[in-house]
Image (cartoon, rainbow, N blue to C red):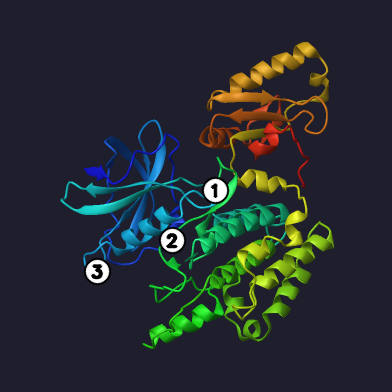
Amino acid sequence: MAHCGSSEPSAKVQAPHPDSILPPQGGVDQSMKPVLFEIFGELWTVQSRLGQGVSASVYRVSSGRATAAVKEFQADTQGGDYGYHKERSVLEDIQGHKNIVTLYGVFTNHSSMSVTTRCLLLELLDVSVSELLVRRNSSTQGVRAQQGHSMWLVQHCARDILEALAFLHREGYVHADLKPRNILWSADDESFKLIDFGLSFKQGNQDVKYIQTDGYRAPEAELQNSLAQAGVEMGDSGCTAAVDLWSLGIILLEMFSGIKLKDTVRSQEWKDNSAAIVDHVFANNSLACPAIPVYHLRDLIKSMLVTDPKQRCTAETALLSPFFSIPFAPHIEDLVLLPSPVLRLLNLIDDSHLHNEDEYEDILEDMKEECQKYGSVVSLLIPKENPGKGQVFVEYANSSDCKEAQRLLTGRTFDGKFVVATFYPLSAYKRGYLYQTVQ
């Protein structure tokens, strides 16, 4: 069983994403997984394994009143707990920022096989940027071979992660492994969050020889990794926070273009003139939006991809880009892919139903009764006029109930009509802002 190493978390507990774990390699028994964890004196049932790697496994767990994830670390090859202590110490030092995953507690697990493991209890997040790109491209097959994310989503992600990096860098830390799989969406907080601090270090005190993932590795990190592999001692200072900006620049370019750039950034053409390739990507990716915002995004990305780390923009200066002053509306695909506590149902209500008060009240009651089958409904709105005329907005008590409703209602038929169910930003709904989404 287990005992805790910190105070009990609140009821709003949830977890990290499996993509924060390395791909499975040797050294871990892939078939074994625990059935229960005792956390803070309470039994939590393991519902599924979310991810597994050499150093750790992540499990989705439930106490009955809350869901969470446990990141369970294996002892390293020397029998120590370096990986656990490293990530725990960094997370404990940087808690409190809205765009960084929350650590709820730590505990030691004693299994029935007399194996002791160290564990973290972390906030549960939803889809990663990597998954979002895969899902968007799969949903647009036949329309276009590759299609990037909308400007609304790129801007949302860029701002959130730059805010996280600005905070992280002010605290003296370098993330050192920024990639699409380490950026996850929070349905409850309606924001992107940064996860996986296993390679993070204090600037000027780098204790990790090999940093960053291939495809998102800054030139200076590439050089340092090569020197370390050759047994050459790295300089006194090591890499700086500038490596994180390089990685984010590549991520934003992939989000905009819809293309994985790993082979591109490893090519000689990229090393000779990366700015020309960025220009080419933007010239080839025509979007249904004004040219000026596209140019602002292009210039922002270029400022992150300067070869000389001393000339590269910082997170704080990047946030001053005019790109962030432009308002965008989400695409309908964005609202299908990004969970929230609010469900929007389309293709249900005819105009004739909206202007007969008795019929309108009956529809409200019928819709509330139907939607309550999937979770606790906080409020329900069917606007009689534009914007939002005839659309059904259902606010659930939490995003989990809303996700279940969206899954089960999508494709259903009501009165001979196929239902289209998307999510909708809670913040916009609360303000009464019912924008028309870009198709």
* Label tally: 3
Q: Residue at x 59, y 66 (%)?
A: 248
Q: Distance between the residues labelled 3 and 2?
A: 20 Å
Left or right: 428, with 71 as reference point: right
Between discs 3 and 2, the one toward the N terminus = 3
* Upstream in sequence: badge 1 or badge 3: 3
Q: Name the residue under label 2.
A: 197
Residue at horizontal 52%, vertical 47%?
126
Q: Residue at x 32, y 44 (%)?
A: 6
Q: Name the residue type under label 1.
A: Lys
The answer to whether any part of residue 216 appears in the image is no
Task: Give residue 38's position: percent from left, percent from top.
Answer: 26, 40
Image quadrant assignment for residue 12: top left
Give the number of the mark in front: 3 or 2. Answer: 2
On residue 98, the disc is 1
Q: Are marks 2 and 1 in contact (CB under 8 Å)?
A: no
Q: Residue 183 carries which label?
A: none
Q: How crowded is mark 2: few (under 14 residues within 10 Å), some or many (20 or more)?
A: many
SS at badge 3: loop
Residue labelled with disc 3: 77
- Circle nearer the viewer, 2 or 1: 1
Question: Cβ–Cβ below 8 Å for labels 3 and 2?
Answer: no
Is 113 on the left or on the right of 121, as rendered?
left
- The picture places residue 165, in percent across and down from the top left corner, at 56, 61
Report whether residue 432 is seen. Answer: yes
Determine crowd level at label 3: few under 14, some 14-19, many 20+ residues with C-alpha closer than 10 A. few
> Which three-letter amino acid code belongs to the residue tagged 3?
Thr
Gap between marks 1 and 3 measured at Cα: 35 Å
Amino acid identity at mark 2: Phe
